[in-house]
Image (tube, grey):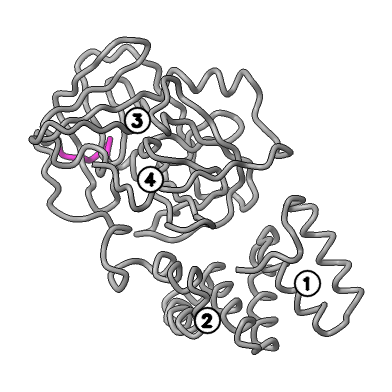
Amino acid sequence: MIKKSFLLTLWFPLSCLATPSVEVLFNTNPSVVKVHVANNKGNHGVGSGVVVAKNYIVTNCHVIANSQGIHVTKYGVSYSPDALIADWKSDLCILKFKFLELKPVVMTSTADVEYETDVFTKSYGGNAARPGSSFGTVKAKFDYDGRQIIQSSASFSLGASGGGLFNYDGELLGITTFKTPGRSAFYYSMPVEIIEEMLANGEEISVTTAPERAFWDRPEENQPYFMRVVSALNKKNWNKLSKISEAWVKDEPNADESNFHLGLANYQLKNHDRAYRLFTKVVSQNKKHTLSYLYLYKIAKLNSKSDEMTKYKKIINQLDSNMSLEKDE
């Protein structure tokens, strides 16, 4: 069933964000469905799903896990699956149907998706009668078993699990899967490459009993580094962030996010020289890492380097004009 602890806060995007064309928004509607489940106690729940191939709909495993009945609805028509392909660890489950007369999406590779790429979500968040959208940009990408999980500022709420994350061409990048708790929530989507692999090689099953928990729903010490840093960020525990990030950099020495988070920890702990080196490394690898430019601006301000402040301010405004230069983590 839906993990409520990770789906509590609804963030409204700023109205000045760019939005995709009406045609793109309209054309993605037919491929997004509402998923209904019931358990052995008679409780009902809803989530979202995306048609990814003829007779196949993907949703999150936590939407349908341990359910006794599943059906999806679209345009007043109900469809019941007859098989399941599950990747419980990744939290992606594909429902198979015999006669599904719904339009599949176009999926595209996430490998070359850049930071600050415009994206939008499409789902039945809030148990809406029609699929709704939210808008944002790609804020980070994290390695997960050789795939790239996408963090974006496009929000989603209760009922949106299993919805789609699309680029502004209407191509599916990922499945809206989980968010972190707290007011400054992070929103994560699982990449389409996992779906493609499941469609090609997945084994069909008929039971919904979950043999293991999703990676993001495990104890903190068993989560990937990008999840382990969240509690330290929320609690502003910079020593903890430093410890986790040191281990992260050791395992992923050239990853943008491992170096950024270690730089952030050092900045907050007043180790500004090391923080500067780490942020500089990140932007040398990723010209669109807005947060690294933000902290380079802050360090320049601390050192009264007006030319550097002007340079970084210009870059930040070009990448994300909504970002406040006073923003802190």
Q: Main secondary structure of the magenta part?
A: helix
Q: Residue at x 43, y 47 (%)?
A: 189
The magenta region covers: 198-203
Tag 2 secondary structure: helix
- Residue 38: quarter of image: top left
Q: Which residue is mark 2?
A: 238
Q: Which mark is residue 49?
A: 3
Relative image position of residue 279 (x, y in whole percent): 66, 75
Q: Which mark is residue 177?
A: 4
Q: Amino acid at mark 1?
A: Tyr
Q: CA distance from mark 1 to mark 4?
A: 33 Å
Relative image position of residue 110 (x, y in whole percent): 50, 46
Left/right of residue 69 with respect to residue 237 in the rendered view:
left
Left/right of residue 3 with respect to residue 128 in the rendered view:
left
The answer to the question of whether label 1 and label 2 lie on touching residues, with beta carbons closer than 8 A, is: no
**Picture layout, residue 221 above or below residue 83:** below
Q: CA distance from mark 4 to mark 2?
A: 27 Å
**Picture layout, residue 290 above or below residue 4:** below
Mark 3 or mark 2: whose residue is earlier in sequence: 3
Q: Residues within 10 Å of mark 2 (few under 14, many from 20)?
A: many
